[in-house]
Structures are given as structure tokens and as C-alpha cells.
Image (tube, rainbow, N blue to C red):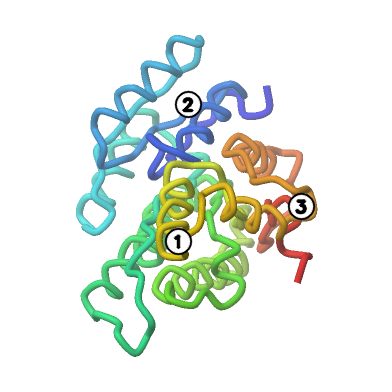
Amino acid sequence: MMLKDRVAIVTGGANGIGREISYAFAREGAIPVVADIDLAAMKSAVLEIESMGGRSDSVETDLRREDRIKAMTAYVVEKFGRLDILVNNAAISGARADVAEMDLEAWNETFAVNLTAPMLCAREALKPMMAVGRGVIINIASEGGRSGFPGRSPYSVSKRGVIALTETLAIEVGKYGIRVNAISPGRVITNLLKNSIRLMAESRAVSEDEVMRGLIADCSLMRFVEASEVAGAAVFLASDGSSAVTGHTLVVSCGKHIMH
């Protein structure tokens, strides 16, 4: 097992990509602590992990609140006596509007969850990691943050910031034996993507299949990314197999990033 007995916090770990990362970590022997605001999904994820013979735990977390982030990390360290891995996965899609019509409150909320929360989670996780001279932080960025995203500037800019945060942290904490990397997924098959396809189809007065064909044509592998494939990348970056990798953004996009 690549992650045997390692303790990991996975924010947004109850749904979508985060849930798949939690499952993948458990299969590799880690103890994923599912941190989420969705209590029902969080309980379901933990039960699923336990049903397949893994170990897991959960902690209710509102990443918009600094005190809850502090409490989340303190709970994990107190219960397990260590924190080996932090996955900053939780994010929101944010407001859909051009900058000329942007609502400041919506902008700030997106940044609070997508960029400020990863910084705060990293700040708190670094305390136990620095004390023992090891640890891994993985930030989930997005291909939507590596190029302009018209009408979705809060999401795009916050995700670009995640990449800058990753590189900055990697430089700051390398001397403590801590590695910091990011994963930049392309279009991943989740409920969020399906909803986006539906909205695009409605706005263009075309079928969802037509929208999907156009999106898939942007990918050299001619398909969307599976959440489990992002989880596989997270396992690699969390494991000793990537022991010399830090400050890197690993693109998992089915080739979307090379098509334009």
C-alpha cells in the first residue's frame, strides 16, 4: 500500500472528486478524514470506506470560517496524533457574470472558499507537519484557472491563485521536508459538469449531446476525465513515488490543455 497508516484531511471529501480521493487514499492504506459541510454525504462516504475494509473519519467544516478550519485541524491532530496529508479540494463554481456586471459579494464568496480557505487550511496543517519535518499538501486547481474563462472570472482567477499559492508554499516549506503540489483537472464527469452542459444547451437552444460533442472535441483523448483519474494523480503526489516532486501543477485533462 502506497499510503499505509498516513492521516489525510480531504476538504470537500464527501462528493465528486473529493469523495473519489478519499476512497483512493483508503484503498492505499491511508486514513482519510472527510471534511465537508454536507453531513449526509459525509456520513455516506465514511460508511462506504469502512464497508470496503478501510479506515476513515469525518469532521463537519465550514471553510468560510477561520475558527472552523482551526477546529478541523486540531480535531485530527488530537485524535490521530499526526497529520501527513492535506488535500485542498473543496471549491464552488462562483458567480456567472462578466466583470462589468460582477457583484462584489459573489466575487468575495468565491475567493473565500476557493483561495483563502486553502491558504488557511495549509497554514494550520503546516504546524504539525513542520514539527515533525514531513508532510504533503495537494491543492486542486483547474484548467479553468490556467486560461481566461469569460463569464466565470471569480472561479478562474481564484483557481489561478491556487497555482501561485502552490508554488509559493513549496518554496517556503521545502526546508522542512514538506512537499506542495497541485492538480489541474480538465472537464471531470461530475454533477456540476452535467448541470453546466444542461445550462449551455438551454442557452444555445441546442441538445445536450451537441454541447457534449463540442466539449469532447477539445480533448485529444476525445473524452472527459473521470473523477477516479484525478484521485489516482492525488495518490501519486501523496506517495513516496513523487518524493522529488514539489511546486508542480499536474494537468489531468485528457489532453484539453494541448489542443489550443
Residue under numbered circle 1: 205
- Type of the residue with mark 3: Ala
Query: What is the x, y in percent for residue 9?
Result: 43, 39
Q: Residues within 10 Å of mark 3 (few under 14, many from 20)?
A: few
Query: What is the x, y in percent for residue 193?
Result: 48, 49
Q: Nearer the viewer, residue 153 or 205?
A: 205
- Choose top left, top right, bottom left or bottom right for residue 24: top right
Q: Nearer the viewer, residue 4 or 107?
A: 107
Q: Nearer the viewer, residue 10 or 130?
A: 10
Q: Which residue is found at the position 24% from the left and 38% from the top?
A: 60
From the viewer's perspective, tell me whether residue 147 is left or right of residue 81: right
Q: Nearer the viewer, residue 125 or 62?
A: 62
Q: Earlier in the sequence, mark 1 or mark 2?
A: 2
Q: Residues within 10 Å of mark 1 (few under 14, many from 20)?
A: few
Residue under numbered circle 2: 31
**Mark 3, mark 1: which one is toward the viewer?**
1
Residue under numbered circle 3: 244
Element type where label 1 sits in the image:
loop
Element type where label 3 sits in the image:
loop
Q: Which residue is found at the position 30% from the left and 82% from the top?
A: 102
Q: Which residue is found at the position 65% from the left and 38% from the top?
A: 229
